[in-house]
Amino acid sequence: MGSGWHEWPLVIFTVFGQCVAGALIVAGFAWLRENDARGRQRIVRSMFFLWLVMGIGFVASVLHLGSPLRAFNSLNRVGESGLSNEIAAGSLFFAVGGFWWLVAMLGKMPAALGKIWLVLSMVLGVVFVWAMTRVYQIDTVPTWHNGYTTLSFFLTMLLGGPLFAALLMRIAKTPFKGRVAAWVSVVALVASVAAVVLQTHSLGTIHSSVQQANTLVPEYGSLQVWRIILLAAGLGCWLCALMRRKVPTLQGLALGTLLVVAGELIGRGVFYGLHMTTGMAIAG
């Protein structure tokens, strides 16, 4: 029992990967709507941080395997294993999106092809997140085998992605109102709070003859409270400026992004802490 932080490589990989996928979608739409070539190039340069964070996530995932050489073995059962599908989808997303960024950065990307390639990268980001959710839909782990897992993974994408993208646009010094993206994140925050309340009740109905699911993480309530506080504070760094019709500062967006990511890292730690195999008969 515990907070689940012993699975820190997976915590980092999943949260970073989902935030990058969401940020690429929002930043990608900003790039597609930008008519000025110099503005597009500034956006592309700022996207370097997307692939830097994605790279950190993949390094963390390799560390989880114990040896870098085992990373290749994880692709042995693509199409049959959820883990293999996740690694394959993530690698494809990283390769296609990263290569688009590199070619666009060098100024060698044809305009029409660049749009198609970017949209494909954005779609692959969603596929990557979906593949992540399938890894944990294990019928012998009742605390994971439910809709809350899928919901929480996509909510991370909607919470961290838009704010990360807003930070990139600020770095690029590109006009970006982002009000729609900001309200998407607000809706995601409300949905996250609702999911915590509903899942708390659900955990009370899952138990074996020797273990109760809601005792797996003794600090479950306090950790979720801290998570929600961090998420709200992080989004507030962005929303307060927008509501005052001012341009969010670089420092404010950077702080907000860090707070939201920290909140989701806590939430993902709780998720891994809820691991519970059937072992004995499970009720619920």
Image: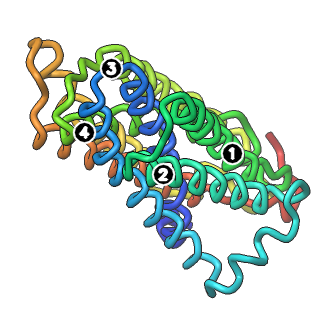
Mark 1 element type: helix
In this figure, which residue is indicated by the disc labeled 3? 35
Q: Is residue 14 above or below residue 226?
A: below
Residue at 56% in and 52% down: 271
Q: Are marks 1 and 4 in contact (CB under 8 Å)?
A: no
Mark 2 element type: helix
Q: Is residue 200 visible?
A: no
Question: How far is mark 2 from mark 4, CA to CA?
Answer: 17 Å
Marker disc for residue 15:
2
Q: Which of marks 1 and 4 is in front?
A: 4
Residue at 85% in and 71% down: 76
Instruction: Name the N-terminal-most of marks 2 and 1.
Output: 2
Q: Could you tell me residue 92's position as x and y percent?
A: 66, 54
Residue type at tag 4: Leu
How many C-alpha atoms fall within 10 Å of the one at disc 3: few (<14), some, or many (≥20)? few
In terms of depth relative to the viewer, which is nearer, 64 or 102?
102
Instruction: Name the N-terminal-most of marks 1 and 4.
Output: 1
Q: Do the residues labelled 2 and 1 touch (CB within 8 Å)?
A: no
Mark 4 element type: helix
Residue type at tag 2: Val
Residue type at tag 1: Thr
Question: How far is mark 2 from mark 3, CA to CA?
Answer: 32 Å
In terms of depth relative to the viewer, which is nearer, 186 or 94?
94
Instruction: Name the N-terminal-most of marks 2 and 3.
Output: 2
Q: Would residue 240 appear left or right of 120 to someone viewing this image?
A: left
Q: Where is residue 43, by image quadrant? A: top left
Instruction: Name the N-terminal-most of marks 3 and 1.
Output: 3
Marker disc for residue 133:
1
Q: Are marks 4 and 3 in contact (CB under 8 Å)?
A: no
Name the colouring of the figure. Answer: rainbow
Q: Nearer the viewer, mark 4 or mark 3?
A: 3
